[in-house]
Amino acid sequence: MKTIKILTALFIALVAMSSCTIEDNPALTPVNVDGEWYTEVAVTGVTYDMGSVDELIEVGYDHVGVKLSLEGGIGMWTHYYIKDGEMVNYDGGYDNLFGYVPMSGGSILVKSLNEFDNISFVEGMDLRYSNRQIVANLNGMDVVFNNPSAEEALKMRKWDAIITDDHMGYAPDEITTDFDPNNATEPSRARRR
């Protein structure tokens, strides 16, 4: 009986000493995927040309660029429809937020933040982080997202500025105010009744 107790105690001690925590095992530690991720896929199709005066003019595109912006559990997706290296239209941005949770083993759980979110692009997508890339399974095809190169980051900033102008409903040269940029020539005064 004494031998059984000693063997049991040794077994428990051995198991306790050999067990590890999540922090001890990098494969079980959720990775930090925050940042911008970009991919460009050769896909053809037709969309409306946002650069034309007539909003109903269609134009063909030869690539679709996709940006995933991830920060602190909130993500945003943007599609850039590209023709000859230039964006001709977009989808996403602003209203296309989603929640995400990095899981152990590199998988990334995607979820809706609220009932108004448009997560149609990422919903049900198998996202996983591996080798400094995010791999997304889209309709049985793996699409690889990388951190954007300096050139890609520059063109996305340019395109995002165009999207912001379009989303806000004005172009930068259309913003005017009644304020005079010159210095005041006399002291300010309050209106008297």
Image (cartoon, rainbow, N blue to C red):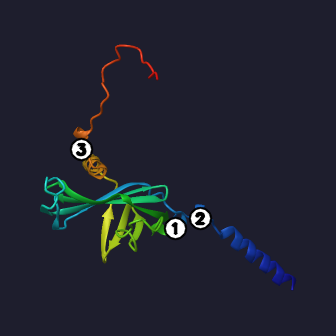
- The amino acid pointed to by label 1 is Ser
Place residue 2 in its image quadrant.
bottom right
Mark found first going from the N terminus, 2 or 3: 2
Dot 2 and dot 3 residues touching (CB under 8 Å):
no
The reply, left or right, for residue 175 in relation to residue 45 is: right
Give the structural element (helix, strand or loop) at label 1.
Answer: helix
Q: CA distance from mark 2 to mark 3?
A: 51 Å
Q: Given the current orientation, which residue lies at the most extreme front position? A: 193
Q: CA distance from mark 3 to mark 1?
A: 45 Å
Q: Which mark is residue 35?
A: none
Dot 1 and dot 2 residues touching (CB under 8 Å):
yes
- The amino acid pointed to by label 2 is Ile
Indicate the position of residue 1 as horizontal and vertical percent values: 86, 86
Q: Nearer the viewer, residue 102 or 166?
A: 166
- The amino acid pointed to by label 3 is Ala
Q: Given the current orientation, which residue lies at the most extreme bottom position? A: 1
Give the residue number, with chain letter if any, for mark 3.
Answer: 171
Judge depth for marks 3 and 1 and give the one in front.
3
Q: Given the current orientation, which residue lies at the most extreme right position? A: 2
Give the residue number, with chain letter if any, for mark 2.
Answer: 22
Place residue 132 in its image quadrant.
bottom left
Indicate the position of residue 140 as horizontal and vertical percent values: 31, 77
Mark found first going from the N terminus, 1 or 2: 2
Q: Nearer the viewer, residue 63 or 171?
A: 171
Give the residue number, with chain letter if any, for mark 1.
Answer: 104
Identify the residue shown where x is 69% and y is 73%: 15
In this view, 193 is above or below 119: above
Residue 132 visible, this angle: no
Indicate the position of residue 77 as horizontal and vertical percent values: 35, 60
Identify the residue shown where x is 74% and y is 75%: 12
Indicate the position of residue 70 as horizontal and vertical percent values: 42, 57
